[in-house]
Structures are given as C-alpha cells and as structure tokens.
C-alpha cells in the first residue's frame, strides 16, 4: 500500500504523528501543554482521515492507542531478566546499617554514591521496545513471568509509542510503575460507588485493577500514569549509572521519578529522603517510601542479588499518613448479621491526598478504652489503604460538658431492641425484619465473592429495596428490565447490563452460593470447605453437627450455625425456589474425591480449537467440571474436537482420524443430555 501514497501525503502523515506524539508528551509527561485541546483534536482528526483514506497507519501513530478488541485471557510473558523486589528499612539507623553492608561488601571505607527517588505505590511493569517501537508490555507477576498487557498499556498516554532522541537501542526492557493520581482515584471510587460497584481499597489496587482488564477500553477510560526507574535486558546501548539511565529515559521521553537526586554518603541520602517526606503531601500520587540505589552500575554488579532482592538497593518506608480533625458524631451501622458497629463522622480532612470524613471505631469496647467522645479532637491515621483509624484523642481540647458514648439500646435502623451477649464485644439487633440487615444481606449476596453480580452494589441495592423491588435476595432473580427503567439511576444500557449480569450469575458454584447465603460464620473458606466435602446442595439438607464436625478444619461455631440454617424448613423452601423456579444452576467443581468420576462427560477426552463464544479457559473448566478431560493435541484417543471459528490444523487432523467434531453449542447440549440421563445435581 505504502508505495501508492503520494510522497507529500506520506510526509504530512509523518509530520502529524510526530507533532501529536510531541504534544502528547508535553501534556502527559511534562505537564506543560503547548497547544489547546481543540488544536490537538483537529490534528488528530486530520491524521485519522488520512489514515483511512490511504489505508496506511504508521507504527507509532497515536490513533493506535485505543480500539484493540477485548482479550479472552492474558498471555504469559517471561521476563528476560527477573523483576526483583526490594528489602525495606523502617528507620534511618536501618539505612545506616545498609550503607555499612554495602561498604563492607565493596571492601572500601569511602562514601558510596546513592540515588534517591520516591517509591511509587502502583503496579510494576516491563515495557519492551524493539528498534525504538513499543513491542510488548507485561506485569511483574511472580518476578519471572508476568501477563501480557500490551493493549492496555498502549492506552496509557504517558507511555511513549516510540523512543525519541539520538540514542535508540536495538532492544530494551524499560521498568517502571503504573499508577493512578490520588484525585483520579477519589473520582473513580466516587463513580464506582454511585454505580453500585465496590470501590477500590487503595490507589495501588485501582491501578492494578485497571491494567489487568481484558477489555482495553476499560483501561483507556481510567487515567493512568507511568514513572520509569530502571531497565531489564538491553541491547545496543549501555549506561554507567542510575543517574545516566534516568537522564537518558527523560531524553527518550519516558516519564521519570518526580524527585531524583544522586548524593554521596548515607547522611546525604537521609536528608534527600527527608526532603521527599516533606514533599509527600504535595505529590499528586501515593508514595509510601523512598528507594535508595547504589548509583554506579559497575558497583551494583559487584554487589549482586540475594534471592530476590538486590544488595544494592533498599526501600525506606514512611510512617502512615496522619491528620488531626474533630469528631462531629458517633453513630452505629447495622451489618447483615445485626451487629451494630460504631463509626465516627469527622470534619472532612485531607490525609495524604485523600479526603477522610469517617472511620470505623470497631466496637463499643474500643470507644470506651480510647474514651472517644463527640466533639473530641483526634489524630487519624491512614495506612496504605484508604480506611482510616483513630489513633488517639487530644484530651486537652475536649469541649466542656461532653459525655461518654454509650452503646445504643435501640437499633439505629429499625428501633428494635439491641442485645449484647455475655462475653461478646458485639452489640446486635435481633429483629428479623431490620431493613439494614436485609439490605446488607442482599449486598453480600451479590458481592464479588458471592454471586458476583456486577452493578449490584450498595447504592443500587438500597434503591431497589426502598422501591420495594427486592425484599429478599431471591427477588433479584425476579427483576425485570422494565422495572429498572422506571428508576432514576437506570437508562436502557445500564438496565440491560444489570439484567445480563443477574442472568450470568445464575450459573454458579456451590462454594460461591454457600458464601452468598450469608450464613453466620460461613465465610469464603468455610464455604469452600463444605463444597469440597458435599457433592451438591441437597446433601447439606438436614445435615447434623456430628457429620460436620468430622470434617477437618470445621469448627464448632460454623457447624452449629450451619445446622441451624439447614434444619429450618423456611430456608430449605427458599433454596428449592431458587433452584427450581428461578433457574439457578449450581455446579460443584470443588468436590474433591469424586471429581471426574461422576460427571456427565466422565471418561471422555476433548480437544478445543478455533475461537469459542466463551473464553477458552471457561470452556475448559466447563468440560473438566463435567468430568471430561481436556487435551491439547488431537490423537486416536480423542473423543470430540470442539471446533469454533478459524479452527486451524487440528480440524483436518481430527477428520483424518475420524474424530467427531462438534460446536460449542453441541457441547452444551451433550452435557445437558447426559445430565438428563443421570441427574446428578438437582
Ligand atoms: S526499583 C531492584 N524504584 O517497588 C529494583 N522500584 O518493593 C526494584 N517501586 O517491584 C525496583 N517505585 O514495583 C524501584 N522508584 C522505584 C520504585 C520501585 C516503586 C516498586 C516496584 C518494585 C517494588 C519493590
């Protein structure tokens, strides 16, 4: 195609790509835009039009950042050089010891030159460039092998698509951290909460969750940044020191650490760290420490690596962020089991870049112990997570006439009696009709570890409950799209998305379902344990404590709570309704011993080829859960070849060997038909 493009058009396209990439760099890396957004958009559109008209796209064209289709799963990528982790120092004395070790190993008493940079709290990445062009991006993973997230990383505007400058290596693995700014993190969590989704616990999780998305469009919708601080394998260029490397990274248009210094001797390192600690509050990103590295690469080489940490670097960890604020009120919130947990409402305060306006006080004894009162001035601490804690009360600033907090005797949600059992710290509302408990139960039912219904978080459950559309969790499966459309938060697409997510959740596992039911003391671990030991739900009906106590790791409390649950006719009726009338399909891949012996596909071997309507992994799991065996190559012992679109050479081989070929749909039918023959689950 290229030959047919007139030379002047080619030059024009090259110029547009170059300029757009330059302005992108000014905006996202330097934070110094040189043109208006409208001008940028105009150039972008011209480029796009030329690309379409001449059917030609330059490899570093900015139009290629977005638009890649969703993946089925991430490919694995082996790092040419392992991605290491860092040893930690929690005090300046520990840093001085690190310096002593370095000097001893080098056999010299002379001051060592170190670099100091902030430690970014995000997700470690390796980005490979070949002949200057972005080739591949992968996560750190276990250090040896990570996941291929190239399409997602392309959408991060601070990531150069091409290495600029005089010195472009043949191939280089750039190492850095992908992170999200604190403001964007807060905005994202607000959006998620409003959409009824679970907010991220901290900026690191938000960055990791955004990069590990199968659909690059989701990553593109998040504002992610990059800070580069190292390299892995490299060909065609060499650096003498960290300082030289960082200078080259900046010249090549990579974003580098916000603060960087090279200093001689550990005391100067300490003052550089103090400087970063002081700047910490004004950084746009979350940092939990500073990274100290021996500057000279030759010396780094001599010092080497111990297991997974280099001897030439250390991370100095900051203390958690603290702030001072006033307690406006102390209230109680009711959980799904009726436990009333106290929490404090604060005058909003920025702590380490995040606005804090409330915190849990854990239990009523804790309030008593710390003597926290309404109107008190308190020190609040925020560690890595956003959830803050009250550290201490400034008694000297307590307003006159303040009273001790007492445990409420009425439930704050329904006004029923509150009881506190002997020896328990928890105060509990014992009403079966307490709306707060019901709402919490439904939220738990739909949560990620439970039925995993995306879009059915706190806000939406509250709304649906208030409107009387769901009174108990099984009502979720009776919701209709028209009902959702009448609600203020739903438009056609969001209503359809929720209905589809509910539909998808019907196909679940016994472990998830048991967890979702919210039986007291049955968390994810206990639910999995039960699933391993009971073939299906029916087998738990009328279970006795003796049977349960025979299971290793099963505690008395769990056994008794389960027996109470499964011996209640109302509960069993509800389960029957869910399975028989509402169409839940509960599989049990966890059932350990008999797995594969009893499933409808037992004794059958399958090979999968071509693209499937469902992720490949899911199809494999479906076959294995049903007792079948999945093999990677067609042979005489293959029973079925499951073929999708673009099947490849396996199809011809199967035909040659007379192996039956079926589609994904026929596979489902086969499982169904075999199940009818031997009803196993319900
Ligand atoms: S250097 C051997 N520099 O911290 C060198 N790491 O705890 C290891 N990190 O996996 C990396 N900011 O994800 C380095 N300025 C920085 C860093 C940094 C954040 C992360 C990185 C690494 C982890 C180790």
Image (spheres, rainbow, N blue to C red):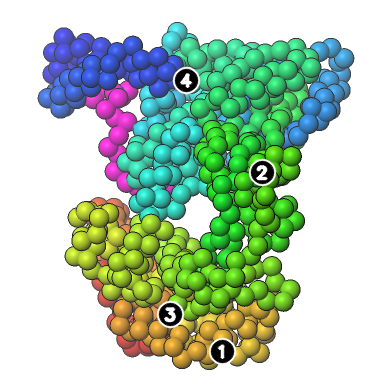
Q: x, y percentage for residue 109?
A: 87, 14
Q: Which residue is mark 1?
A: 543
Q: Residues within 10 Å of mark 3 (few under 14, many from 20)?
A: many
The structure residue drawn at horizontal position 33% and vertical position 88%, both measured from the top left corner, is 677
Residue under numbered circle 3: 599
Element under disc 3: loop
What span is in magenta?
56-74
Task: Write down the quadrant of residue 500 in the picture.
Answer: bottom left
Residue 64 on the magenta segment: yes
Residue tagged 4? 254
Q: Which residue is mark 2?
A: 399
Q: Depth check: give the residue in front, 289 or 301.
A: 289
Q: CA distance from mark 2 to mark 1?
A: 57 Å
Label 2: how many Cα within 10 Å (few below 14, some 14–19, many 20+): few
Q: Is residue 293 left or right of residue 342?
A: right
Alpha carbon distance from label 2 to label 3: 69 Å
Depth check: give the residue in front, 181 or 214. Answer: 181
Label 2 to label 4: alpha-carbon separation: 53 Å
Q: Residue at x 63, y 88 (%)?
A: 545
The mark lying in front, picked from 2 and 4, is 2
Q: Secondary structure at mark 4?
A: loop
């Amino acid at each position: 195609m290229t030959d047919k493009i007139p030379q002047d058009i080619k030059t024009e396209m090259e110029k547009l790509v170059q300029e757009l990439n330059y302005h992108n760099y000014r905006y996202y890396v330097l934070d110094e835009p040189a043109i208006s957004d409208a001008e940028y958009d105009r150039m972008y559109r011209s480029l796009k039009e030329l690309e379409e008209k001449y059917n030609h796209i330059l490899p570093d064209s900015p139009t290629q950042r977005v638009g890649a289709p969703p993946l089925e799963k991430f490919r694995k990528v082996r790092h040419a050089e392992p991605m290491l982790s860092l040893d930690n120092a929690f005090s300046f004395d520990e840093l001085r010891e690190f310096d002593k070790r370095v000097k001893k190993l080098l056999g010299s008493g002379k001051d060592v030159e170190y670099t100091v940079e902030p430690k970014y709290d995000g997700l470690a990445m390796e980005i490979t460039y070949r002949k200057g062009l972005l080739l591949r991006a992968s996560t750190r993973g276990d250090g040896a092998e990570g996941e291929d997230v190239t399409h997602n990383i392309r959408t991060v505007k601070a990531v150069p698509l091409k290495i600029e400058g005089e010195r472009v290596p043949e191939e280089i693995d750039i190492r850095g951290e992908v992170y999200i700014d604190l403001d964007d993190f807060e905005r994202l969590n607000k959006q998620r909460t409003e959409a009824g989704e679970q907010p991220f616990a901290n900026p690191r999780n938000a960055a990791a969750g955004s990069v590990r998305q199968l659909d690059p469009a989701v990553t593109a919708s998040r504002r992610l940044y990059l800070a580069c601080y190292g390299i892995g394998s490299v060909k065609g260029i060499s650096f003498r020191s960290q300082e030289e490397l960082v200078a080259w990274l900046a010249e090549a248009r990579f974003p580098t650490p916000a603060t960087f210094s090279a200093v001689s001797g550990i005391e100067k390192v300490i003052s550089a760290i103090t400087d970063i600690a002081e700047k910490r509050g004004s950084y746009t990103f979350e940092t939990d420490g500073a990274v100290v590295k021996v500057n000279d690469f030759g010396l780094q080489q001599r010092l080497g690596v111990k297991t997974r940490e280099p001897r030439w670097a250390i991370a100095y960890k900051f203390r958690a962020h603290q702030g001072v604020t006033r307690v406006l009120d102390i209230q109680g919130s009711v959980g799904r089991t009726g436990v009333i947990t106290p929490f404090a409402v604060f005058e909003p305060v920025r702590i380490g870049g995040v606005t804090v306006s409330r915190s849990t006080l854990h239990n009523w004894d804790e309030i008593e112990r710390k003597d926290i009162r309404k109107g008190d001035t308190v020190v609040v601490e925020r560690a890595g997570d956003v959830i803050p804690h009250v550290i201490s009360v400034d008694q000297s600033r307590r307003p006159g006439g303040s009273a001790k907090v007492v445990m409420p005797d009425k439930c704050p949600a329904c006004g029923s009696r509150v009881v506190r059992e002997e020896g328990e710290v928890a105060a509990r509302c014992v009403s079966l009709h307490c709306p707060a408990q019901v709402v919490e139960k439904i939220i738990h039912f739909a949560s990620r570890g439970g039925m995993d219904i995306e879009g059915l978080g706190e806000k939406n459950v509250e709304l649906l409950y208030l409107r009387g559309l769901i009174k108990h969790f099984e009502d979720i499966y009776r919701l209709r799209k028209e009902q959702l459309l009448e609600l203020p938060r739903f438009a056609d697409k969001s209503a359809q998305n929720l209905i589809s997510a509910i539909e998808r959740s019907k196909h679940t596992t016994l472990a998830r379902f048991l967890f979702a039911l919210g039986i007291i003391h049955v968390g994810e671990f206990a639910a999995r344990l039960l699933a391993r030991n009971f073939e299906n739900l029916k087998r738990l009906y009328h279970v006795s404590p003796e049977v349960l106590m025979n299971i290793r790791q099963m505690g008395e409390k769990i056994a008794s709570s389960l027996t109470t649950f499964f011996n209640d006719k109302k509960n069993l009726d509800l389960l029957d309704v869910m399975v028989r009338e509402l169409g839940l399909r509960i599989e049990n891949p966890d059932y350990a011993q008999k797995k594969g012996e009893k499933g409808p596909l037992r004794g059958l071997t399958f090979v999968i080829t071509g693209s499937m309507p469902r992720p490949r992994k899911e199809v494999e799991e479906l076959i294995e859960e049903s007792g079948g065996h999945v093999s990677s190559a067609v042979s005489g012992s293959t029973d079925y070849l499951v073929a999708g679109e673009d099947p490849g050479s396996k199809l011809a081989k199967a035909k040659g060997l007379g192996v039956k070929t079926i589609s994904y749909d026929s596979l489902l039918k086969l499982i169904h038909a075999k199940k009818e023959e031997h009803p196993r689950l319900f």
